[in-house]
Image: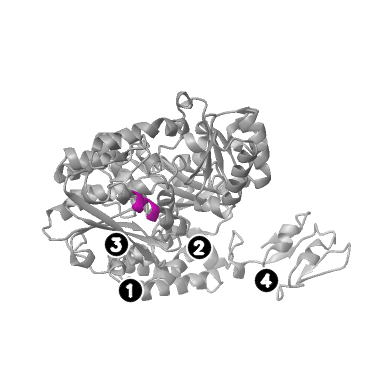
Amino acid sequence: MIKLTLNGAWINMKNINELTALRDKFKNSIAIRTGDTAAANGEKHVLVCGGTGCHSSGCNAILKKLKESLKTHGLEDKIKVVVTGCHGLCALGPLIITHPDEIFYELVEPDDIEEIVTKHLIGGEPVLRKVYHEAIVDGKLISFHETDFFKYQHKISLKNCGIIDPECIEEYIARDGYQALAKALTTMTPLEVIDMVKASGIRGRGGAGFLTGRKWAYAYLTDSDKKYVVCNADEGDPGAFMDRSILEGDPHAVIEAMAIAGYAIKADEGFVYVRAEYPIAVNRFEIALKQARDFGLLGTDIFGTGFNFDINIRLGAGAFVCGEETALLTSIEGHRGEPRPRPPFPAIKGLFGKPTILNNVETFACIPPVILNGPEWLSKLGTENSTGTKVFALGGKIKNIGLVEVPMGTTLRTVAEQVGGGIPNGKAFKAAQTGGPSGGCIPAELFDIPIDFDNLLSIGSMMGSGGMIIMDEDNCMVDIARYFLDFTVEESCGKCTPCRIGTQRMMEILENITEGRGEVGDLEKLEELGEHIKASSLCGLGMTAPNPILSTIKYFRHEYETHINDKKCASGVCKALFQYVINEKCIGCTICKRACPTDAICGEVKKPHFIMQEKCVKCGVCHDKCKFSAINIG
C-alpha cells in the first residue's frame, strides 16, 4: 500500500483498475507531447534532453537557466519543464522541444534561454536562429516530425525516449506502462506469453539475432527449482549507445519486460548487468526499480496473482567480452568474465547453474508492446525473417550523428542519406561498418541493400547491437580494419588460443601492411588465419573478430594491394606510406612554416618552401593551413 497522486487517495496496486485509473489521470498531459494539440488545453511543456550526449554538452546549465527565467517571469507553475531521455540528434545538443507547438531547438546555450522564454514561450514567436535547421524549409517552419531525420523512423524501443520523464513512473504508466504485465499475469498463461513472443518473430537485438520466443521456450521447458532473467546492458561496441539511451530514457520498459519474461519462464529473480561507465543510466534505473517496488509492480504477489519477481543490478568494469552471454553470467557470479563452452546453453544451465534467459535492453523494450498489441502488430513491420524495427547509433562521416530507429528492411541508402542527412562536405559514401568490431564493412556498391539480419550476414557483416559507422572517400579501409582488430586484440579475454594468438598474428600482418612492410602473400595469410579463428574460437568475440578484415579484403582488395605493392596509402591516412610535399604554387607566405610544430619547413619569405621529411611528423597542420593548395599528399 502506497500513497500516490490519484485524488490524494491510498492506492493498492494489486487492483488493476487502479493502474488504469492512474494511466487515465495522466495520459492527456503526456498526449500533448505526441502531437495531440487538443489535449493541451492551454498548457505548455518544455522538454530538455537529459541524455548522456546532452549532459556532456551542458544541458544542466540550460535547465538551471530555464527554471530561473521562468521563475523571474512568474511562469514556473504555468509552463512544465521536463527532463527526458535522448531526443536523437546527439551532435546538436543541448536540445529543447516545446509543446504543443513542436518547436525543436538545437545547440542551445545558456545565453539563448532568456530570448526563448520571452520571445517564444511568452510572445509566441519561435527564435528561428536556434530552431533545428532542417525544420526551416524555404524560410517557413515545419514540424520536426516532418523532417527527414524523423519521418523515416518508426519508434518501438524508443517510443518513450525524449517524451517522458524517466524518473517519473506516473508518466510511464500514462503511456500504457505496466498494462502489458497486468495483461500477461491476469489473462494469459506463461506458455501463451511465450507463444505470442514466438509468433511476433522478434529476434535478439544484441547481435546474434536468435529467436527470442524460442530461447524463452527452452527455459520454460527446463525443470528447476530456480530460474533467472538477465538483461545484458554491457554495451561495448565503439560508437554504440542504443541500450544506454533506453535505460536513460525509458527504464520502466525494461523492468516491465523482465517481469513478463520472469512470469513466462517461471523465474522470480532478475539481474541487469550494466557497465559502470553509464552513471546516468544506472542512477535512473535504480530510481525506477525503487518506484516499481513502491508501487507493488515488483516484489511479492504482483497484481494479487501470487507471482513474485524482483530485479538486481550488477555493475561491469567495461570488459567487451562480457557482452558475450556466458562471460556476462560468469561475471555476475563474481568471477573473471570469461566465456564458457556451449552447450549447455544458458537456457538450460546458466546463472549459478540454473536455467536463464538473457536478452539485451533493446530486445526487452520491444516485449511490452508485443504483449499489448499482439504478435501480428510487430510481424507486419520489417521483413519476413527480421520483424519489427532496429535502433542504430549513427556515427562517423554523417551529418545527423545520433540515435535512430527504423523498420527492418530499410535500405542502407535511406538510413545514410535521408535519416542521416548524407555525407558532409560533398564527399562520396565509401562504406558503412555495422556490428562494431564483430561486423563487416559494406561497400558503396551495396548501398541499396535492405538492412536485416540475414542480408547483413550474407555480405560478410552482421547486425550486432546496432552501431553504424559511416565512412567517406577519405577513409583508408586498411586502417579501418586495423582499428577494429586492435580493439578486439585488446579486449580478448585470452581464454582460447585462436582468439588470443590468432588475432595478434593478424594484427602484426596488418601493422606491417600499414607501415610499408607488407609482402606478397599477406592477404592470403590474413584470409586463412581469419577462417581458422572464426571456426575454432570459443565465443562470439573470437568467432567474429576477423569480420572487419575479411570484409575489407573482399570489397577493397585493391587498397590492400596498393599498400603492399606500391607502398602507398591513396587516402593519405597511413602515415608511413605518404609524404607532405610543397608544390610550385607556394608563394612563400610562411603560414605553413609558422604553423609547423616541429620546424620541419624551411624557406625564405616570398620564395618556395621545402619540407624536411626527416623532421616531419605528418600531423597535417601545414596542409590544413595553406590557402593556396600548395601542399600535396603523395
Q: Compute the Cα span from label 2 to label 1.
A: 33 Å
Disc 3 to disc 4, C-alpha distance: 44 Å
Q: CA distance from mark 1 to mark 3?
A: 13 Å
According to the picture, the residue beneath numbered tag 3 turns out to be 325
Q: Which of the two discs, 4 and 1, labels the residue nearer the N terminus?
A: 1
Q: Residues within 10 Å of mark 2 (few under 14, many from 20)?
A: many
Q: Which residue is mark 1?
A: 336
Quadrant in the picture for residue 494: bottom left
Taking 483 as reference, is 452 above or below it? Answer: above
What span is in magenta?
286-291
- Is disc 3 surrounded by few (<14), some (14 to 19) or many (20+) residues within 10 Å? many
**Residue 591 versus residue 285: which sits nearer the camera?**
285
Element type where label 1 sits in the image = loop
> Do the residues under discs 4 and 1 have CB atoms within 8 angstroms?
no
Residue ID for mark 4? 617
Front label number (2 vs 1): 1
Disc 2 marks a residue whose amino acid type is Val
Q: Is residue 626 left or right of residue 299?
A: right
Furthest residue to the front? 9
Percent from the top left, x then y, of residue 520? 47, 70
